[in-house]
Image (tube, rainbow, N blue to C red):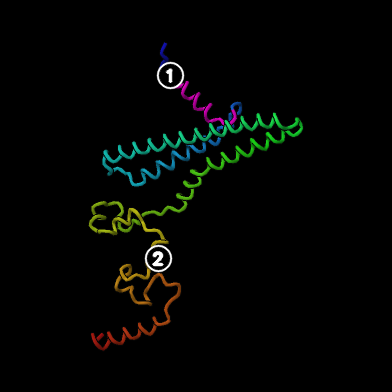
Amino acid sequence: MSLSLEETHAKFLKGIIEASKLYPRNILSTIPSVLFLISTFALIRTQIHKYTDSRTSWKTKLWRNIVFHWMYFYMSRIWFLFLKTCKWTLDYSDKAIEASLRSDAMLYNKIMTHSSIFGIVMCIAAIPCLVLIIWYLNRRGNVDFMWVDEDPYLRSEMGTSGHYLDRPVSGAVVHNFVSEPSYRSGRSSSVDTDVHLRARSVLRPVQSALSFVSGKYVYGY
């Protein structure tokens, strides 16, 4: 007899819970699986839908959602295969310890083996969460100067600068090219007006005085 939708869903959830346990009789052993699945979901969705907003076309949204579900499905599958391998390792190690050690040392070796494998699983499960935290701390907000960031047509009229409003250049990339003439404007090409210099130029007062004198006698002010 075929199962109803509710029964099938309940059976699926029960199977997911059992597969998420590192130790079959301990519900707390699902903590690594919960941490990995939630953080992976948040990380993949954040990266794929980083530039999705109300102006994004429905075809682009559909394609990004398909890619998101495909990636999350295979990441979850890899995780459960890894967890199954860890369970097999625990069973094999328990049998090997029981066959080779005396009763006084058996309990200690089992505790150390189970603790080590649980620590390894927990460290691997925390990797997506760590990546998500690092990305959140290092993210850079768009500059909303005169509401330029909120007007896509104005951003397109600005040329390449509109691109960098959506995708700001990191500080490391900017610092590597500050000495290039193509990066700096004509006014900032002089050594005393370079905003990236660590200290103020000693020639600034002299050049300012020369500019004042030349302007006074040439332009009459």
Q: Is residue 181 above or below residue 170?
A: below
The amino acid on which the numbered mark 2 sits, given as a three-letter code, is Asn
**Quadrant in the picture for residue 143:** bottom left
Q: Is residue 9 above or below residue 73?
A: above
The amino acid on which the numbered mark 1 sits, given as a three-letter code, is Glu
**Quadrant in the picture for residue 158:** bottom left
For residue 121, side relative to residue 12 (left or right): right
Residue 102, horizontal then vertical, whole percent: 75, 31
Farthest residue to the bottom: give it. Answer: 217
**Pointer 1: residues within 10 angstroms few (<14), some, or many (20+)?**
few
Report the predominant secondary structure element of the magenta stretch.
Answer: helix
Is 13 in the magenta?
A: yes
Q: Is residue 116 above or below residue 9?
A: below
Q: Residue at x 29, y 59 (%)?
A: 161
For residue 134, side relative to residue 150 (left or right): right
Chain-order first, disc 2 or disc 1 = 1
Q: Which residues are magenta?
A: 8-23
Q: CA distance from mark 2 to mark 1?
A: 59 Å
Q: Residue at x 75, y 30 (%)?
A: 103
Residue 6, numbered circle: 1
Q: Give the number of callouts.
A: 2
Question: Which of 202/220 is in front?
Answer: 202
Residue 98, horizontal then vertical, whole percent: 69, 29
Is 11 in the magenta?
A: yes
Question: Which of 163/79 is in front?
Answer: 79
Disc 2 marks which residue? 176
Residue 210, horizontal then vertical, whole percent: 33, 86
